[in-house]
Image: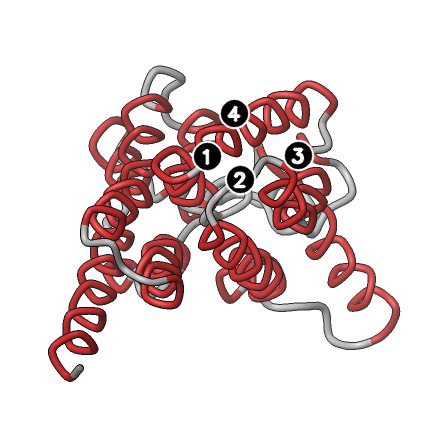
């Protein structure tokens, strides 16, 4: 029993460290010599690589980030681990991606590792999520659509007779997503008043502080959170 618990803890730590490898940040540094945390949404993610580094770099960064979730899932499935263990180990990769120890806990949103978990454990769910994300990009509703889909995912898993651990992970992913959107990599909220609650609502449902999505994505270090430029 003790050996099993120690094995789970070890795999959780390794999964977290794998998730913490900041591939998007490294792409920004290596390709354009920029700190991706200072651009766009401020997330260390493949989407920000697309916006501010290089379009082609989305693919190696995205594939690596997906593998962050897929590799722990494959290992857990190969070891025939139970539901609690596989959920904890796989979600550790998401937490590492969102709060990476190598970047002072300033990371992404965890969607790519979650896609990796689905790819390894529930391919139908992976396809559903990919189609939904594509539709979200086209209609510019990615953030609310992602949240709605996460809330519905346990039902989707049940309808398609998917693995029970995916439902548990989807619930955990929903909670992590809401926390990360509010926390927003430590970005401060307005000091009280109506604007504070407006920004909280935007973060929860739109995953941004500004009304205009494109202005939010295209921010640079010379702009503040309102999108205004400063010399």
Residues packed near mark 3 inside 10 Å, few (<14), some (14 to 19) or many (20 plus)? some
Q: Which of 28 and 168 is in front in this view?
A: 168
Find the distance from the CA under tag 3 to the CA under tag 2.
15 Å
**Residue that carries the numbered disc 1 in the rendered image:** 48
Tell me, yes or no, whether the two marked residues, 1 and 2, touch with CB atoms within 8 Å. yes
Find the distance from the CA under tag 1 to the CA under tag 3.
14 Å
Secondary structure beneath label 1: helix
**Residue that carries the numbered disc 3 in the rendered image:** 142
Task: Judge whether 63 appears above or below 95 on screen.
Answer: above
- Estimate the x, y position of residue 154 in percent, counting from the top left: 62, 50
Q: In which quarter of the image is the C terminus?
A: top right
Task: Judge whether 87 appears above or below 35 on screen.
Answer: below
Q: On residue 40, which mark appears?
A: 2
Find the distance from the CA under tag 4 to the CA under tag 3.
16 Å
Give the residue drawn at x 37%, y 26%: 53
Name the image quarter holding residue 60: top left
Q: Which of 81 and 41 is in front in this view?
A: 81
**Residue extending furthest right?**
194
Give the residue drawn at x 52%, y 61%: 172
> Between tags 1 and 3, which lies in front?
3
Find the distance from the CA under tag 4 to the CA under tag 2.
27 Å
> Between tags 4 and 3, which lies in front?
4
Secondary structure beneath label 4: helix
**Residue that carries the numbered disc 4 in the rendered image:** 127
Find the distance from the CA under tag 1 to the CA under tag 2.
7 Å
Residues packed near mark 4 inside 10 Å, few (<14), some (14 to 19) or many (20 plus)? some
């Amino acid at each position: 029993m003790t050996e099993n618990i120690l094995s789970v803890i070890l795999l959780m730590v390794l999964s977290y460290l794998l998730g913490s490898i900041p591939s998007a940040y490294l792409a920004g540094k290596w390709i354009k010599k920029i700190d991706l945390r200072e651009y766009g949404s401020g997330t260390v993610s493949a989407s920000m690589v697309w916006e501010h580094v290089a379009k082609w770099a989305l693919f190696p960064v995205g594939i690596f980030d997906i593998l962050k979730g897929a590799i722990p899932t494959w290992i857990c499935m190969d070891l025939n681990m139970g539901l609690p263990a596989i959920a904890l180990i796989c979600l550790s990769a998401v937490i590492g991606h969102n709060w990476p120890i190598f970047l002072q806990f300033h990371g992404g949103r965890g969607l790519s590792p979650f896609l990796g978990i689905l790819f390894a454990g529930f391919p139908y769910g992976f396809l559903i999520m990919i189609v939904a994300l594509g539709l979200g990009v086209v209609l510019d509703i990615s953030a609310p659509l992602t949240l709605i889909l996460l809330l519905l995912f346990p039902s989707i898993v049940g309808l398609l007779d998917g693995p029970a651990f995916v439902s548990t992970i989807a619930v955990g992913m929903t909670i992590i997503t809401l926390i990360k959107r509010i926390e927003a990599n430590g970005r401060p909220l307005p000091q009280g008043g109506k604007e504070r609650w407006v920004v909280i609502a935007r973060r929860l449902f739109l995953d941004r502080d500004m009304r205009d999505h494109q202005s939010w994505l295209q921010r640079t270090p010379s702009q503040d959170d309102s999108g205004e430029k400063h010399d």
